[in-house]
Structures are given as structure tokens and as C-alpha cells.
Image: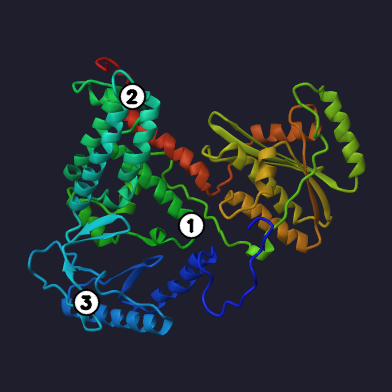
Amino acid sequence: MGNFYSDYFLQSEGVPQGSILSVTLFVVHFSQILQILPPSVEGTLYVDDLQISCQGNNMRLIERQLQIAVNKLVTWCDENGHTISPEKSRCVHFCRKRGIHLDPTIHIRNAMIPMVDEIKFLGIIFDRKLTFLPHILHLRKKCDRSLNILKVLSKTSWGADRTSLLRIYQAIVLSRIDYGCMVYGSARSTVLRRLDTIHHSALRICSGAFRTSPVESLYVVCHQLPLHLRRQKISAQYYIRALSVPRHPVCSMTLPVSLQRLYNARPSHILPFCERVKLLFHDSEFHNEIIQTSDFFSFPPWDIPKFSFLNPFSGYDKSTTAPVVFQTLFHSHRCQYSVYIPVFTDGSKSDGHVGCGVLFDTDTLSYRLHTSFSVLSAELVAILYALQTISLFTERRFCIYTDSMSSLETLSNFHNRMHPIAMEILALLNILQNRDFDILFCWIPGHVGIVGNNLADNAAKTASSFLQREIPFCDAKNLLRVVCNHCGRNRGIVRPIINSIY
């Protein structure tokens, strides 16, 4: 503590109490338990919360497979110093049929696992018919109690303003409603509408509206979506996030043709999660677009890439410095690094057009990108394709110039959640450096008369050759926001109904 250190001691087993490594090491060790399950039994694990499941038409076969899995789990825990608690374990028989199949009997050693009609797993209550009615009733009761905080803070003579009340509502009530909505969103609409009264009551408290005020007016004044649109938005965000993660289970979920025919013949049946999200995207600009995956393990922790760039213009303010000064500084910089071949990159975004340009001494490359790409993504794509073109050269010394400081800062600050295109750039740069390429990066101010930058900028703005490329998750979120707003406008959510508010 401070400048004082504890005495050294030998830790023969485990980790010291309170060590930050304890949770990580436990997860790494305990995750092996899923590998011992039989092929017919599926399991999911979150820290020490484990659930196993088996499906089929023969209850005796299901019971036998689950008992074999439980026996293997008990044996593994005995060998690794863990204990499965029969008192905390529960068994649920999920079936929409009434009385056709008997409930299974599963034992942990000599103790029978209790059979229940509903169970809470990771904050979601699953009932045996998957109606999610118990979960929504429980959620409504908790949120109703939390509304008392808003009522206390929203007095007529004193209290918090509308903005503060809305922030409190989003923190203590709406966050609970949002949690797990992609799971319980498969409930019937009549069941889900039980939460609408909580949402509407909270908006009336925050806005000070009358009980007779139209609900649409509350949405407009409080800048809130209806809960069914909010669930669709959160579900879509989760879906595209899952698509950006390699080998995510959601990516492999497809509806068989036989079930597709069944759902088409019975429109009243609620589609699975992935099909509901795909239906939401069907008529939007997001349809058939591919999300770029992010490989978080491209670099091991002991080999994190180090990126740096030159900035010969530091100390000069662009707003108070004449362009000729920057031109002189750039000319001096080129004299110093004359042995390096200059490469200029730039990205551009305007209404309905996103492009990137790469300028070499003898060639100019320009590509048009999907309109959902941000300026940062366009700048990074230009750098990426500059490196890919450099890899074909016989020369080994290059200097890439860009006027995007945000791109260079992104490449400089490595973390496992960084931009996927930036991750590609660092991986390709590492390969080129191993091939004895000497590549420098330099920031230059834009639109100050540097010829190479102006030509690259013009190439990005006039690019016509469309580049079919996966959309980064960060850009897909922005496109999803546009889709949700468009959906809200079509349903009349954002029309200016402001009468009868106060």
C-alpha cells in the first residue's frame, strides 16, 4: 500500500483472497465442464450458473440422457474440488402439451432434483410453457415499486425537472424492462402489453401530463419509443452484435424449411428470435447486408502491436496559420524523408455517398462504400487498401499520409474492442513489417493546398467503383437507428401531437 509492500510468501494452492485473477482463473477452469456433456445434451454456462437441456419425443430417453449428464458432472466436480448443490438445483419440463408426457426424475447422488413449473435463470423467469407471463408479472411488480421514487421527486411545488426525471426513469425502471427483452419478447402481445402501463405512468410523471393526455403526445414530449418498438430496436442491436462475433451461437440458428411452412400456414404463431429480427430488416436498407466480424484474439497479450505516427505540424493551429506555412512544413518533411515513397489516403462522406481514395505516384485508387459507413470507417478502409497495394510493390519504404487524426489515434490505442478495420490494418502491418517493409504514418492537415491530399480527397468524393465490403458493427448501429426512426415515423409515433399535455 503506497510505498510499502507485503512480505513474500509461497502460494501453494489457489490464489490469494481478493486477487483480481481469481474470477478469470475460475472461469477458465470451470468452462471445461461443458466438454464432458453427452452429444445429445446441450449446456450453457455463466460463471458458476450452469443449465443443461435435452429435447425429444421419448421422455424415457430424455431422462436417461440427462441422468448420464448429471452423473458426469458430479464425477467431474468430485475430481476438481467442486460440489453441485441438490438444494439449489431445479428441473423444469418444457412442454405445451397437457399431461401427455410424465415429468422426468433426475437425481444428484441420492437426492432427487425438485420439479418446478418455473425457474429463474440469469434474471429471466422461464415457465414450463414459455409464455413468460410469470416473468412479466414479476417485472411489472418490481417496476411499479420503483415508480414511487419518481412520484416523490416530481412534486408540483418542488422537485426535479423533466430531464432529470427521465434519466432516473431510464436508470432504475427502463433498464429492468430492457434486460432480457430479446428473450421474453417472444411472449404474446397481450402479455407484453402489461408493461405498457408502467411505461405510460412513468412518462406522465416525468412530463407532468394529465391522465387524459394522448399516449402519442407522451412519446413525442419525452423522446421515448413505445415499448414494442424499443424491444425491436434492442433485439436488432443484439442480433447484429452477435453477427459481429465469430462463432456466436446466434449465427448458426436457421429455421428449417418444414418449420417455415408451418409458420407461414399459421401466422398467429410467434416466430423465433432470429426470424423476427430478419423480418424487421426485410424492407429496410439493412436487408442482405453482412456484418463484419471482429477477431478479438488477433494478437496475444504478450504481442500487442505498437503503432506510432509522425506529426510535423504539431504546435500550429489550423485556424490561425496560413496554408503556405503548412505547405512549407510539408515540403521540409518530404526533404527529410525523401527515400520514402509518399502515399496519400482520404475518406469522404456526404448525402448518399461514401468513398475512399488512395493516391500513389503512378496510380490512383478510389472506391465507393455502403452509405452506412462512417467517415472514420472510410478513412480506415483507404489506409487498409493502401497497405494491400503496398504489399505488391518491390520497394520497401513508404510513408502513408492521412488528414484523419481520429484514424491514427484509433490505431495507436489498441484494445480488444477497437474498430474491426483498424484491427485488420494492424494485422496486415505486422505481416508487412515481418517482410522487411518500412512503413511510416504521418498526419497532414486537410484542405491547406497539399497537392497529394487534395487529389486523394477528390478521388474519394468522385469514386464510382462500388466496393462490396462487410459493414462494421459500429456503423451498423447507426444504420439501425435510422431504420427504427423510419419505423416510428411510419407508425405515427413522431407526429407533433402536443395539445393536452399540461
Q: Earlier in the sequence, mark 2 or mark 1?
A: 2
Residue 95's disc number: none
Callout 2: SS: helix
Q: Is residue 73 left or right of residue 361?
A: left
Q: Residue at x 30, y 32 (%)?
A: 150
Task: Where is residue 193? Give x, y as percent.
Answer: 20, 40
In the image, residue 335 above or below residue 27: above
Q: Are marks 3 and 2 in contact (CB under 8 Å)?
A: no
Quadrant housing the N terminus: bottom right
Task: Where is residue 304? Give x, y as percent.
Answer: 67, 60
The residue type indicated by label 3 comes to: Ile
Specify few, some or many for label 2: CA neighbours under 10 Å numbering under 14, 14-19, or 20 or more. some
Q: Nearer the viewer, residue 65 or 112?
A: 112
Q: Earlier in the sequence, mark 3 or mark 2?
A: 3
Specify few, some or many for label 3: CA neighbours under 10 Å numbering under 14, 14-19, or 20 or more. some
Q: Residue 228: tell me if it is visible.
A: yes
Q: Residue 494: tell me if it is visible.
A: no
Q: Are marks 3 and 1 in contact (CB under 8 Å)?
A: no
In the image, residue 260 above or below residue 11: above
Q: Earlier in the sequence, mark 3 or mark 1?
A: 3
Residue 220's disc number: 2
User: Separation of disc 3 and disc 2 at Cα?
Assistant: 52 Å
Q: Residue at x 53, y 37 (%)?
A: 371
